[in-house]
């Protein structure tokens, strides 16, 4: 009887260990030639990459500063063209009333103000 109780005790203690599922066997991945390798996932099941967040729009002052590569506060026609600041390029001679060959932020602001008041005065 003692042998039966001892065997039963061992079986009850060992039972939880046998009830667990065994870990899957690990095998080395098969190597294939790069040109014959099949894609891991199909396009419809592949995770789509997140779109990058849109860049915040630059203010007119920031665009002026970025275009002013000489950092002297004076924007030349060539600098405005390189930065693709279309309104300044298109109206450069009107903005540069004095014919200095450059415009400043104040020149652009005065030109915009004059154009706003001229277009609103019906």
Image (cartoon, rainbow, N blue to C red):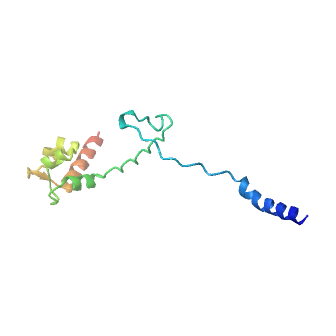
Q: Residue at x 42, y 41 (%)?
A: 31
Give above or below for 38 relative to 58.
above
Quadrant for residue 92, please give it: top left
Please state if 7 lies on the left or on the right of 47 as rendered. Answer: right
Please state if 93 lies on the left or on the right of 85 as rendered. Answer: left
Q: Residue at x 22, y 43 (%)?
A: 87
Q: Position of residue 50 (x, y in %)?
A: 44, 45
Please state if 92 lies on the left or on the right of 35 as rendered. Answer: left
Residue that lies at the very extreme toward the bottom in this rendered image:
2
Q: Position of residue 11 (x, y in %)?
A: 79, 59
Q: Position of residue 32 (x, y in %)?
A: 41, 38
Quadrant for residue 104, please give it: bottom left
- Who is closer to the viewer here, 95 or 54? 54
- Who is closer to the viewer here, 94 or 64? 64
Q: Residue at x 27, y 55 (%)?
A: 62
Please state if 46 lies on the left or on the right of 59 as rendered. Answer: right
Q: Position of residue 80 (x, y in %)?
A: 17, 47
Q: Residue at x 27, y 51 (%)?
A: 60
**Considering the image in quadrants, where does the C terminus appear?**
top left
- Who is closer to the viewer here, 24 or 46? 24
Total numbered labels placed on residues in the image: 0
**Considering the image in quadrants, where does the N terminus appear?**
bottom right
Give above or below for 8 relative to 41.
below
Give above or below for 71 relative to 27.
below
């Amino acid at each position: 009887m003692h042998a039966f109780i001892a065997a039963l005790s061992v079986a009850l203690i060992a039972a939880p260990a046998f009830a667990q599922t065994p870990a899957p066997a690990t095998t080395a991945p098969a190597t294939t030639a790069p040109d014959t390798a099949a894609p891991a996932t199909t396009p419809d099941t592949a995770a789509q990459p997140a779109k990058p967040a849109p860049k915040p729009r630059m203010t007119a002052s920031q665009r002026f500063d970025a275009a002013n590569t000489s950092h002297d506060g004076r924007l030349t026609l060539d600098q405005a063209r390189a930065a693709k600041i279309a309104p300044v390029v298109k109206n450069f001679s009107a903005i540069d009333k004095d014919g200095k060959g450059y415009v400043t932020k104040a020149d652009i602001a005065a030109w915009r103000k004059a154009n706003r008041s001229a277009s609103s005065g019906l």
